[in-house]
Image (cartoon, rainbow, N blue to C red):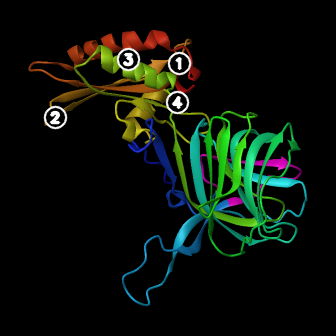
Amino acid sequence: MRIFNFAVVVLLALPAIAAERNLNFGDYPLDQTPSNFLSAVGGQGKPGDWKVILDDTPSAMPSRKPGAPSVTQHSVVAQLARNAINEHFPMLVLNDDTFDDFKFSTRFKIAGGALAEMAGIVFRYQDEKNYYVLMASALDNRFWFFKVVNGQRGKLIGPQVAISENEWHEMSVQCEGNHIHCLLDGKELIPMITDSSFTSGKIGFWTKSDSISYFTDAKLTYTPRESGAQALAQDAMTKYPKLVGLKIFAARPGSPGPVIIAGNDQKQMGQPAGDVERDVITHGKSYYGKNKKAGTVTLTVPLRDRNGEPIAAVAIVMKTFPGETQDTAALRAQTIMNTIQPRVSSLEDLVE
């Protein structure tokens, strides 16, 4: 089974440092629910049947060859259950992080449904009774925003617009504080919404009743929040300027396994842990490695909670010197850990 990973890049055009996640469903096994997503349901009935499937999607780049096919087989995530219950809202929620200010876009296709033909984005999701939705309806030919608070749906806001079945469209939502921008196929069809019900939350996909809906090319740009782990990593790099690098690995709630949650290289955030880091977290062991070509040593050591149980792995990369032994390298790494460990009592100290 392949583990989902994503790229994090710095977007220099934005006023603040931003990060980008591309949700590539080709990184997941076919015919399974993506591992770091939560299948939830609002209203009545059972959760939906969300699976990664292959579907024909428009080619990202036009072909230079005349007569070349304009579509290609592409991995998409689809809601396939046909639960014909009116107040039934299947959702697939990215479960490994929450977001404050962000822009989330996805292509979608409404492939079927009798009672409803809808597809949408759920965002600033708190739980199955509290969230925002941006959705398109092929039966009603509407593009709507609404909110759900304590299980009660608010007013539907949005225009009448043609939404074709079995064709790919794009919708996106951008949140900046309490300002919400809603776009369909690149056009902001709903005037900016101001609402302060939810200031942060999770994001994902939404459908209604027996809608068969596909989603792909989902992209999230967001302002990262500094976690406790990132504060620890930055403080250590500042206090020990001769450090070459430092990474902290831990399992976020809802993630399939430990990933890099903090470090000196933003591009590595979210990459899955290797066998060494997983063993450090599982068994509390420490590992020593030496890179003669780079002239560095790496100590990977456990970070423990208040009960002494390993909850994370810290990889400390240091320049070596002639005659250095594994014992002296371990002592140098321990000096750094002595400034980190006292500030951690639980996993929540790292990921919140």
Question: Would you name the residue on which mark 4 appears?
Answer: 225
Closer to viewer: mark 3 or mark 4: 4
Disc 3 marks a residue whose amino acid type is Asp
Q: Residues within 10 Å of mark 2 (few under 14, many from 20)?
A: few
- How much space separates mark 2 and mark 1, taking CA atoms? 33 Å
| Pointer 2 or 3: first along the chain | 3
Which residue is at 53% across, 18% downward? 309
| Pointer 3 or 4: first along the chain | 4
Query: In which image quadrant can residue 63 be found?
Result: bottom left
Which residue is at 43% across, 26% downward? 313
Disc 1 marks a residue whose amino acid type is Glu
Question: Would you name the residue on which mark 1 appears?
Answer: 309
- How much space separates mark 1 and mark 3, taking CA atoms? 23 Å
- How much space separates mark 3 and mark 4, taking CA atoms? 16 Å
Residues rendered magenta in the picture: 33-50
Question: Would you name the residue on which mark 3 appears?
Answer: 235
- How much space separates mark 1 and mark 4, taking CA atoms? 26 Å
From the top left corner, tell me how far across and down residue 137 is, in percent: 78, 65
Question: Would you name the residue on which mark 2 appears?
Answer: 294
Q: Residues within 10 Å of mark 1 (few under 14, many from 20)?
A: some
Q: Residues within 10 Å of mark 3 (few under 14, many from 20)?
A: few
Q: Looking at the picture, tell me which residue is in the foreground, 149 or 215.
A: 149
